[in-house]
Image (tube, grey):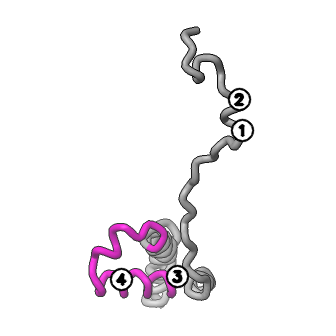
Amino acid sequence: MVGVVVTAAAALAAGYLLGRLRPWQRLGDWAADQVRFTGTWVRGGAGRQAVVVLAHAVTAPRTSWRIMRAPAADTPVPVPVRDPDWVANRTHHDKGGTA
């Protein structure tokens, strides 16, 4: 009887600590950050990449599957907007005047 009470108390304490520490959620957040900000983990080597991808796939399988299926998106470079009527819209100062 004492063994059952001790086992139940240990299980309760372990469940409480896991609920407070949330290691699964912390691992998932870490893996998502590593995948999102690829600068440092890409330079970490193949072993680090494998660990990060595995951790992300285990903790967030739906997100991982969506990321793997989505094509790589090119980031658009902002292009300066030019005014086609810049000659007509120049001020006196832009024309070489002194005022």
- Dominant SS of magenta comes to helix
Q: Nearer the viewer, mark 2 or mark 4?
A: 2
Whichever of callouts 3 and 4 sits on the residue coming sooner in the sequence is 4
Q: Of helix, strand and loop, which one carries label 4?
A: helix
Establish if 32 lies above or below 80: below
Q: Do labels 2 and 1 touch, CB within 8 Å? A: yes
Where, by quadrant of the figure, is residue 85 drawn? top right
Q: CA distance from mark 1 to mark 3?
A: 55 Å
Tag 1: amino acid = Asp
Tell whether position 41 is magenta.
yes
Establish if 98 lies above or below 65: above
Residue count near mark 3 (Cα–Cα under 10 Å), binned few <14, some 14–19, many ≥20? some
Q: Give the residues drawn in magenta, as a range.
A: 35-57
The residue where tag 4 is placed is: 49
The residue where tag 1 is placed is: 85
Nearest to the observer: residue 37 or residue 97: 97
User: Which numbered marker is on residue 30?
Assistant: none
* Residue 26 image point, x, y percent: 46, 70
Where, by quadrant of the figure, is residue 30 drawn? bottom left
The residue where tag 3 is placed is: 59
Tell whether position 5 is magenta.
no
Nearest to the observer: residue 95 or residue 45: 95
Tag 3: amino acid = Thr
Q: Is residue 13 visible?
A: no
> In this rendering, would 61 be left or right of 27?
right
Whichever of callouts 4 and 1 sits on the residue coming sooner in the sequence is 4
